[in-house]
Amino acid sequence: MRLRNIPGSQKIVDESPLVIKEAEKTRGLWKELFGNDHPVHIEVGMGKGKFLMTLAASHPDINYVGIERYTSVLLRALQKIEENPLPNLVFVCMDAADLEQIFAEGEVAKIYLNFSDPWPKDRHAKRRLPSREFLMRYDRILEKNGRIEFKTDNRALFDFAVGELGPAGWQAERISYDLHSDKELMRDNVMTEYEEKFSSVGNPICKYIVYRT
């Protein structure tokens, strides 16, 4: 569920130096923006940012871009990071359907999808971030050996996501229907706010890592 609209959130997001404005002008130039040749990883639908902030602090040799559509949600991330900004993390406020407008072909090394909106009605299937429509978009911005990592506690959404892989030309490297019982996958796992919440009440967390065939 999305946060309610917060008065003034748009203004704060617009004025923050951590949010890239007119990001389409950065297409093909993300490494120049960060000032290095490190790989670029993105999280689509980053929520309040805990996941990416943890990764960015732990991996200074990777550049991270958080994509979030809603200013009221992005505001929460800005409030968390403003006291200790990380040089390898920036945000973009945009709709995920427009990813190709801000990332060039092969410019992204990894994409994270965490606890995405399930869009449960069948007529909204194309809006689901692990849908074949979105997999086609990811295909065009990912580098040759790029990976997508997806986590959710919504089994129906996960089953849908797994079913989309073959028709879209993707293959699973790893699939887990109970991430927190998988010692190998948990070795480097970074939990999101939703993951902490749902796992604490006993909901199994599903995860896949996929690549293009």
Image (tube, grey):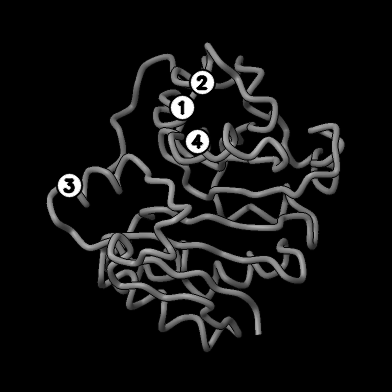
Q: CA distance from mark 4 to mark 3?
A: 20 Å
In percent of width and height, residue 77 lies at 46, 27
- Nearer to us: label 2 or label 3: 3
55 relative to 86, above or below: below
Q: CA distance from mark 1 to mark 4?
A: 12 Å
With 77 as the anchor, is 153 left or right in this view?
Answer: left
What amino acid type should be assigned to the residue bearing mark 4?
Thr
In percent of width and height, residue 112 lies at 53, 55
Read off the residue under disc 3.
200
Q: Earlier in the sequence, mark 4 or mark 3?
A: 4
In percent of width and height, residue 194 lies at 29, 45
With 155 as the anchor, is 113 left or right in this view?
Answer: right
Check whether the beta carbons of the residues at disc 1 and disc 3 lie within 8 A of each other: no
Read off the residue under disc 4.
54
- State which quadrant residue 123 falls in: bottom left
Q: CA distance from mark 1 to mark 3?
A: 22 Å
Q: CA distance from mark 2 to mark 3?
A: 25 Å
32 relative to 131, above or below: above
Q: Residue at x 45, y 23 (%)?
A: 75
Count every numbered label the image shows and give the total: 4
The N terminus sits in image quarter: top left
Check whether the beta carbons of the residues at disc 2 and disc 1 lie within 8 A of each other: yes
Q: CA distance from mark 4 to mark 2?
A: 11 Å
In percent of width and height, residue 199 lies at 21, 52
- In the picture, the disc for residue 81 is 2
What amino acid type should be assigned to the residue bearing mark 3?
Ser
Read off the residue under disc 1.
77
Q: CA distance from mark 2 to mark 1?
A: 6 Å
Which of 29/125 is in front? 29
Give the structural element (helix, strand or loop) at label 3.
helix
